[in-house]
Image (cartoon, grey):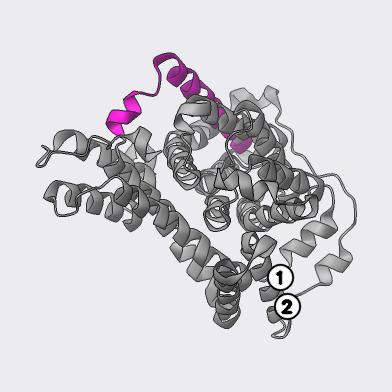
Amino acid sequence: MQNNTVMKKLTKPQFVILGFQHVFAMFGSTILVPTLTGLNPSVALFTSAVGTLIFHLITGGKVPAYLGSSFAFIPPIIAASNAYGVQGAMLGCVIAGLIYVVMSGFIRVIGSDFINRFLPPIVIGPVIMIIGLKLAPEANNMASGHLLTALFTLAVTITVSIFARGIFKVIPILIGIISGYIFAMFYGLVDLTPVLEAKWFAAPSFTFLNPAQIGDNLGAILIVAPIAMVTMVEHLGDVLAISKTTNQNFMKSPGLHRTLLGDGIATALAGIFGGPPNTTYGENVGVLAITKVYNPAIVRLAATFVLFMSFMPKIGALIHSIPIPVMGGIVILLFGMISAIGMRTLIENSIDLSDTRNLIIISTILVIGLSGIEIMIKSVPVSGMGLAAVVGIFLNLILPKTKQESPTEDSETAA
């Protein structure tokens, strides 16, 4: 109800500004993934925008999620591209998306009730915390380039979040980025040369998948596609985080099967056009947590902006000219917000941290998720949040309950 009240007070220009705020939050990471993997950034923007709109169509426009380029696929895409070429890597991405689609159908048939047993708050909470904490080193890398600029940007964003009123209250990230950008100019951190040289209009250079080469790239499929089993766990964590942030149960409506289907089709489509796989973005979950404005239409507007930007290199270059330390100051807050959502899950479900069993489960999940421990399952590396979630589920099932658990302790309450 509070969110609806906020939205009624917003004018159309304010609505547009909120959309741009989501664009700024996702832009850096979405551009970084194709840069590291050798793919085209404009294509990544295109597939990210179209993938987000498809996701909203499939989920009935209920989930305020933005889909950007997935970091989990960076190593396998590089490996598959080196061994089989870009076509082989993209084929693996398409198959990864289809794995999502198959799992979506499976969940639709049997239901998602099994998640209540396997993913109670004692597991969900620390897994969500890992989403943010795992990204903390990236925040350090981004901010350390010019720490003063990062801290200035962070300070402005926090100040606006706490003390601003009206529309300024819900766009602290946008104000922080603009302020940090101007601040960085005085230190010579802004290079506008690429902006001046970029064209106003140009179609992205798509690398369309060639079905005739499928038979020659089975090895690439085995390298890339199995990562979907790990990213599906990340998808679940993000959906739960968004549910917790907005106080809505998206696991129930539109349902996990529909969010998985939307994510899977978006990923498969990205591979067909030559873009990196998509995933729900933690940066934008952080925006939701800070602004407390959850209208999915704002996210769809952001996707529309990004779609136009994929055909307008000059605007893309302007946003890309934002110094990395500026975004470093922003993500310090965004990534921390995600971890705080995980802590909130534990607190609101009255998880007793004096209980040895609970301490064992939480501490094991956190350390495994953050330590970089990796195991190989049929030549597929599993680490990070995926491995931590599996271990947490296993411990929760086998360890005897030492105290009576709260009757509200189920994943539906957590969501």
Give the residue furthest to the top.
109
Which of 88/168 is in front? 168
- State the separation of the CA atoms marked 2 and 1: 6 Å
Mark 2 and 1 residues: CB-CB less than 8 Å, in contact?
Answer: yes
Segment colored magenta: 89-118
Which of 98/1 is in front? 1
Disc 1 crowd, CA 10 A, few/some/many (<14, 14-19, 20+): some
* Residue 116 percent coordinates (x, y): 32, 29
Q: Is residue 312 left or right of residue 276?
A: right
**Residue 263 versus residue 104 in the image, above or below:** below
Residue 58 part of the magenta-drawn span: no
Judge whether residue 378 can be spotted in this image. no
Which of 52/367 is in front? 52
Q: Is residue 97 left or right of residue 17?
A: left
**Residue 178 image label:** 1
Tell me the quarter of the image containing the N terminus: top right
